[in-house]
Image (cartoon, helix red, strand yellow):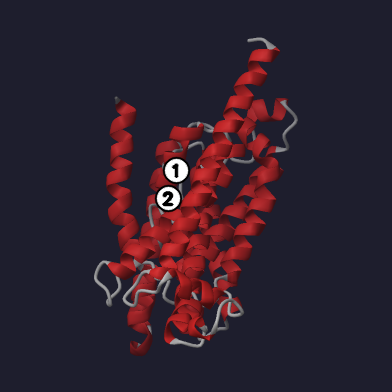
Amino acid sequence: MSRLALRTVAGMTAKRAATIWLVLGVLAVVVFVASLMLGSVPVSPLRVLAALLPWHGSSALASTDLAGEIVRSLRLPRALAGFACGALLAVAGALLQVLLRNPLAEPYVLGVSGGAASFALVAMIAGCAWWIVDASAFAGALLSILLVLGLARHDLWRGEPQDTSPRLLLTGVVIAAGWGAVITLLLSVAPESRLRGMLFWLTGDLNGGGTPWVALVAVLIGLVAIVPVTPQLNVLLRGDAAAHALGVTVMRLRLRVYLVASLAAAAAVTTGGTIGFVGLVVPHMLRLCFGNDQRMLLPAAALAGGVAVMGADLVARTVIAPAQLPVGVITALTGVPVFLWMLLRRRR
């Protein structure tokens, strides 16, 4: 193919990526506004605006009323937490799938979420400060990744890794089951007064997302750390030998991806509990649009994951209002049929 043809294809791909990013951005804004307006107490767009901009409008739209307090204190932090959790889970899933060259790799399946949740629960039971809970979740996520990779791919750091997909998946399933047993043990010894909240949190709960800023900062740090090396990730998809031949420092790149994926999973679990299927389904759906170009996939995964969890949380808050469902239940009920549809579509 000539250079002109290559430039034309690259330009068309970039234009398509920009269009999809724009669509996802608009969709994120729409879902975000709907999350602020809808619920057991409907709030009009003008009152939402008055709540977000207290200096806007007259005293009739003052933000001191009940609607303004609901928007500012409850719905705004929850919507931001939902977007941050979805972005973190989708990016972590996409990174693990690239790193391990396995389409089923994601934080929930590989036990990363379970490790983060186990360590976070220990800190919660001990009554630790929020930053210790966050640090514990990060340590649990990192330990899970190291366990899975150390047991399933012992030769990860040297030479060309063998195709160990079955061993990798079995190891991840076993590690996840082990963390599930630890979580059950922790819940059995947890104080009765905290047990219901912990159970709800483990199934995905954004009700306590009053401080979503840690997760939002984690999204920013993760993207800043990983977007500059997306061309190297594209090379890594072709194997370690090809990456070495093209001058990629594979060990350093893998270490960066491990740390970013662990940070993302830990921040998501700490903020919203264990929300499944987002890191598995969202990257696969985006690959139908982008292919596997990480330069375009990872930013889109952050947007699409945020939209997915915000939308799931909106459904969880409104479907049986004023009662609420765990957001993890909605993502699972939606993610299972969507993923099965994608598998059937791929076979055809």
Q: Which residue is mark 1?
A: 168
Horizontal arrangement in the rendering, residue 306 relative to residue 42 (left or right): right
Taking depth in this image into account, of 28 and 57 the one nearest to the observer is 57
The amino acid type, in three-letter code, at marker 2 is Gly
Horizontal arrangement in the rendering, residue 245 relative to residue 113 (left or right): right
Identify the residue at image location x=30%, y=52%.
334
Taking depth in this image into account, of 41 and 74 the one nearest to the observer is 41
Q: Is residue 16 above or below residue 325?
A: above
Task: Examine the image and state in which quarter residue 232 appears.
Answer: top right
Judged from this view, the residue extending furthest toward the right is: 247
Taking depth in this image into account, of 264 and 161 the one nearest to the observer is 264
Identify the residue at image location x=38%, y=46%.
170
Say if mark 1 contacts mark 2, CB within 8 Å.
yes
Mark 2 nearby-residue class (10 Å; few <14, some 14–19, many ≥20): many
Residue 153: image location, x then y, percent: 53, 42
Identify the residue at image location x=59%, y=76%.
56
Q: CA distance from mark 1 to mark 2?
A: 6 Å
Q: Secondary structure at mark 1?
A: helix
Q: What count of labels does the image hold?
A: 2
Mark 1 nearby-residue class (10 Å; few <14, some 14–19, many ≥20): many
Q: Is residue 222 above or below residue 131?
A: above
Quick check: can you spot residue 333?
Answer: yes
Judged from this view, the residue extending furthest toward the top is: 2
Q: Quadrant of the C terminus?
A: top left
Q: Which residue is mark 2?
A: 172
Residue 244: image location, x then y, percent: 70, 29
